Image: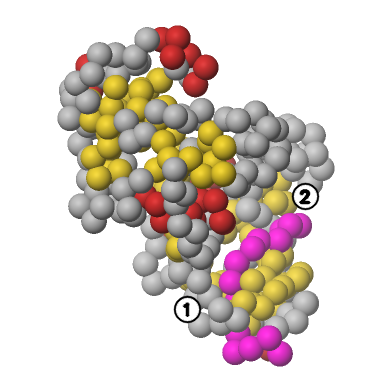
Amino acid sequence: MTPAPSPEVLQAPLVVEFPFTRSLGPVQSAFLTGLRTRTVLGVRTTDGRVLVPPVEYDPVTADELSDLVEVAPTGTVTTWAWNPSPRRGQPLSAPFAWVLVRLDGADTALLHALDAPGPDAVRTGMRVRIRWAAEREGAITDIACFEPYDGAEGGEAVPHTGTFTDPVRGIVAPARLDYTYAPGRAQSRYLKALAGRATYGERCPSCRKVYVPPRGACPTCGVATAEQVEVGPRGTVTTFCIVNIKARNLDIEVPYVYAHIALDGADLALHARIGGIPYDEVRMGLRVEPVWSEDGRYPDHYRPTGEPDADYDTYKELL
């Protein structure tokens, strides 16, 4: 059997992104709603300290907290770090400082951005004030950033009811991770072979199992793998799930099936989408084959081959 060609190690930019939705309790709801009206709220703990941002349980005693107070929009930088290259979604597009600011009347510091012309203009102990966003919706971004301030320290925190019109009940926080993925020698070779419509695994020299996709080492024996073995292209569905929630930026109608597929000759099941069959007819033991993407670089999904179902004993170790 001719091994797959060994390409140079590949690299590709990848983005992992999802919206995180959470409901708010009374304390967090009051804090975010207050920002909409240019009001900064903290919460007083059982020992008299004022926490900003407020939390719903005392970090020392775990007591429930509800004694809301209003603090000043001015404060003092307690520590800072310069950010010379702002990234997507950060508060400012020009270089700025990340600062921890203890607002006047608070005992803890709030993390945010400071608009400053350069690192020489920032120092611990400098006075700053909030620059409010022109349009506010009840989110931490209602504080556009901090800016230098020449005024004196403000007064003590004053009680606040935390009552506002149309309070914010929940938020959606987008989480995003941009990074460059380098698959390494084994997976680079695997991906290169896929572009030629071939699937290769690597055989462990100790236990003789063939792993697909290859990892460069046997996950059982811990020894390096190098022997290339072509597997498939057909395989057997070992187990599966029915997806009923549509993913963003994925043009696949729900419901659809995602399955573990043991390719012929492989000792590890890979996962892929099943198509060409109603979702409620997919079953364990179903024999499938790849349907390649339009550019032929990878299997877009797997479809039934029409063969009889595989006997359970032939794939039970791969569940």
Q: On the image, which quarter does residue 238 sit in? A: top left
Q: Residue furthest front?
A: 1
Q: In the rendered view, would you say 231 is above or below 113?
A: above
Residue 298 as seen in the image, left or right of residue 307: right
Residue at x-position 46% and y-position 69%: 88
Q: Earlier in the sequence, mark 2 or mark 1?
A: 2
Q: In the rendered view, would you say 264 is above or below 179?
A: above
Which marked residue is nearer to the observer: mark 2 or mark 1?
Answer: 1
Q: In the rendered view, would you say 235 is above or below 30?
A: above
Which residue is labeled 2 in the image? 49
On residue 93, which mark appears? 1
The answer, for residue 167, to whether it is visible in the render is no
Q: Which residues are magenta?
A: 104-120
Q: Dot 2: few (<14), some (14–19), or many (≥20) neighbours within 10 Å?
A: some
Q: Quadrant of the N terminus?
A: top left
* Residue 274 pos. (x, y %): 27, 30
Q: Work out whether residue 72 or residue 176 is closer to the camera in this orientation and state it.
A: 176
Residue 252 as seen in the image, left or right of residue 215: left
Q: On the image, which quarter does residue 119 sit in? A: bottom right
Residue at x-position 52% and y-position 17%: 317
Helix, strand or loop at label 1? It is loop
* Residue 209 pos. (x, y %): 57, 30
Q: In the rendered view, would you say 78 is above or below 227?
A: below
The answer, for residue 220, to whether it is visible in the render is yes
Q: Amino acid at mark 2?
A: Arg
Q: Amino acid at mark 1?
A: Ser
* Residue 282 pos. (x, y %): 26, 19
